[in-house]
C-alpha cells in the first residue's frame, strides 16, 4: 500500500491535486512537504493534531516535513472557516505564541537523520519585502475574479454583517508566497492543510506555475465533527489544548476516553500510528468494554504528553473506580472530582466518620450514617471503613488539603480540609 492509499484508508484525505502525478512523485524518491500553523494562541489544540500527524506520517514514509510557523501570516489572520474578522494580535504576543507552538510541534517529528524535519517561520522571508515589491512580484499574478471565487472569500462576502477586510482578503497571497519561497529554497513541491485551506493551497500552486513553470501539489484532510454533530476538539464548550497548563493530561485523557462509539474507529485511524489491521482487531471487542476508547486515549496522551503523564492520567482515572488515591495532588483530585459535591472539614482535632458523612450530605443523620457503616458501604480515600467509631485525622488526607468519602460504588464527596 502506498502512502496516499493508506492515508485514504485512514480517512485522512479530503482532496488531492493530480493524484496520479503525486503518487508518481512520491514513489520517485524523498519529497518535501509543508504545512503551516498560525500562532493564534500560545498553544495548539487537538484540531492541530491531524496536520501534525500527516507530516509525521510522511516522515515515517521517508519524506521530509517542513513545519511552518506563521509569524507573518499570524499578523494578518486567515479568513478560512471564519464568519467574522479575527482580532489582530500584537507583535509581542505573536512572537510568544510562535515559541510556544514550535516547542509543541517538535514532539511529533525527528529533526535528525535522512528525513530530518525543517522548522521555518514565514516572518523571516516576508518582513523585508516591500509593499510595492509584493504587488509587482505576487499580486500581479492573481485576478480579483479568481480570488473572489475561493470559498473562504466568497462565503465572507456573502455575509453582509461582517464582510471581509482587505487585510484578510490578502491572506491568500501571503500563503501563496510562502509556497513559492519553500519551492525555491527547499525544493518543496507539496503543501498540506485542512479542507478549508484548498483555495489558499491552489493559489500557491498557480503562483509556482506562473513564476517558475514548475508543478506543485496540494493535499487536504477533512475538517472533523463528531457523530453527534459537535465540533471536534471541544469539551463543555472549551478547547482541548496540547499545553498541559491549559488542559491537564488527565483532562486530555478523559476527552479521548469519552469518545462516542460511533467515532472511536475513525479516531483510532486518524490519531494513532496503529496499523489498520490492529484497529480492525480492536474494534471486534464488545463496545461496553470500551477497549478501543482506552487504547485511543492512551496512544494520543502518550504522543502529546509522554509516558509519565499518561501513567498519572491513567492512575487518576482509576480512582473513580475505586483505585488507589495515594500520590495524587490537590490539582489531580480537584480535576477528577470537579462535578461531585464538596464539603469543608476541620481536622485540627479528629472528626468522627459519622459526623463527616452528615456534613458531606452523604447521610441525613448520624443514625443513617451508622447504618451505612454497618453495611460496609463507606470508604475513606477508596478504602473501606470498618469501625463504627472510626475517626478522620489530619494524616488521613488523600492529598495536601483534600480527602475523598465514598458511599457505595459511585457516590463520591470531596472533603476540603481547613488549613
Image (cartoon, helix red, strand yellow):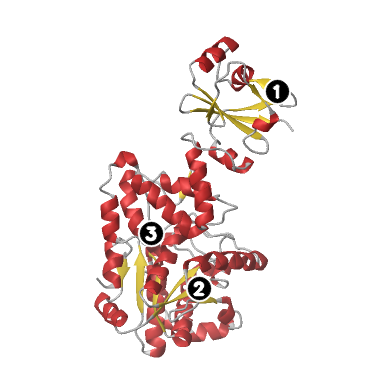
Residue 332: give its label.
Answer: none
Q: Earlier in the sequence, mark 1 or mark 2?
A: 2
Write the residue at 50% across / 52% down.
310
Where residue 272 is drawn, which disc sits there?
3
Residue 54 image position (x, y, % from top left): 39, 67
Which residue is pictured at 58% across the width and 52% down the height? 246
Q: Sequence-wise, which precedes: disc 2 or disc 3?
A: 2
The answer to which image quadrant residue 409 occupies is top left
Q: Nearer the viewer, mark 2 or mark 3?
A: 3
Residue 269 position by quadrant: bottom left
Q: Locate the N terminus and report the quarter of the image it occupies.
A: bottom left
Side (left or right) of 29 relative to 235 = left
Question: Which residue is denoted by mark 1 in the rendering?
Answer: 350
Work out whether mark 1 precedes mark 3 in sequence or the reverse, and give the earlier one.
Answer: 3
Residue 258 relative to residue 40: left or right? left
Can you see residue 79? yes
Disc 2 to disc 3, how far (Cα)? Answer: 22 Å
Q: Could you say which is closer to the camera, residue 197 or residue 152?
A: 197
- Specify whether 267 is left or right of 334: left
The spot of residue 177 in percent (x, y) is 48, 80
Which of pointers 1 and 2 indicates the residue nearer the eye?
1
Above or below, 233 relative to 2: above
Amino acid at each position: 500500500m502506498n502512502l496516499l492509499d493508506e492515508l485514504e484508508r485512514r480517512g485522512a484525505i479530503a482532496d488531492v491535486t493530480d493524484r496520479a502525478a503525486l503518487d508518481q512523485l512520491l514513489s520517485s524518491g524523498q519529497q518535501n512537504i509543508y504545512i503551516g500553523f498560525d500562532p493564534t494562541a500560545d498553544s495548539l489544540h487537538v484540531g492541530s493534531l491531524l496536520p501534525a500527524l500527516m507530516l509525521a506520517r510522511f516522515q515515517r514514509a521517508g519524506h521530509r516535513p517542513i513545519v511552518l510557523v506563521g509569524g507573518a501570516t499570524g499578523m494578518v489572520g486567515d479568513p478560512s472557516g471564519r464568519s467574522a474578522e479575527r482580532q489582530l494580535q500584537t507583535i509581542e504576543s505573536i512572537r510568544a505564541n510562535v515559541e510556544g507552538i514550535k516547542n509543541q510541534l517538535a514532539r511529533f517529528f525527528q529533526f535528525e537523520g535522512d528525513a530530518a524535519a525543517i522548522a521555518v517561520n514565514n516572518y523571516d522571508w516576508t518582513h523585508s519585502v516591500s509593499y510595492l515589491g509584493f504587488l509587482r512580484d505576487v499580486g500581479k499574478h492573481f485576478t480579483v475574479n479568481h480570488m473572489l471565487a475561493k470559498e473562504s472569500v466568497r462565503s465572507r462576502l456573502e455575509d453582509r454583517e461582517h464582510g471581509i477586510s482587505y487585510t484578510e482578503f490578502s491572506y491568500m497571497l501571503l500563503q501563496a508566497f510562502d509556497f513559492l519561497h519553500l519551492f525555491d529554497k527547499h525544493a518543496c513541491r507539496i503543501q498540506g492543510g485542512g479542507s478549508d485551506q484548498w483555495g489558499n493551497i491552489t493559489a500557491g500552486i498557480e503562483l509556482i506555475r506562473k513564476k517558475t513553470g514548475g508543478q506543485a501539489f496540494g493535499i487536504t484532510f477533512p475538517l472533523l465533527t463528531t457523530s453527534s454533530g459537535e465540533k471536534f476538539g471541544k469539551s463543555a464548550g472549551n478547547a482541548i489544548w496540547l499545553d498541559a497548563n491549559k488542559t491537564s493530561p488527565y483532562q486530555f485523557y478523559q476527552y479521548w476516553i469519552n469518545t462516542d462509539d460511533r467515532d472511536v474507529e475513525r479516531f483510532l485511524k486518524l490519531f494513532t500510528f496503529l496499523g489498520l489491521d490492529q484497529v480492525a482487531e480492536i474494534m471486534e471487542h464488545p463496545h461496553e468494554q470500551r477497549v478501543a476508547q482506552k487504547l485511543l486515549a492512551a496512544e494520543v496522551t502518550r504522543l502529546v504528553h509522554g509516558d509519565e503523564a499518561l501513567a498519572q492520567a491513567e492512575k487518576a482515572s482509576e480512582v473513580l473506580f475505586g483505585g488507589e488515591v495515594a500520590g495524587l495532588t490537590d490539582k489531580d483530585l480537584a480535576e477528577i472530582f470537579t462535578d461531585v459535591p464538596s464539603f469543608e472539614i476541620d481536622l485540627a482535632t479528629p472528626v468522627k466518620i459519622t459526623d463527616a458523612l452528615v456534613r458531606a450530605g452523604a447521610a441525613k443523620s448520624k443514625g443513617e450514617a451508622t447504618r451505612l457503616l454497618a453495611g460496609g458501604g463507606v470508604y475513606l480515600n477508596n478504602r473501606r471503613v470498618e469501625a463504627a467509631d472510626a475517626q478522620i485525622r489530619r494524616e488521613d488526607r488523600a492529598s495536601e488539603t483534600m480527602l475523598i468519602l465514598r458511599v457505595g460504588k459511585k457516590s463520591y464527596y470531596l472533603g476540603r480540609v481547613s488549613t
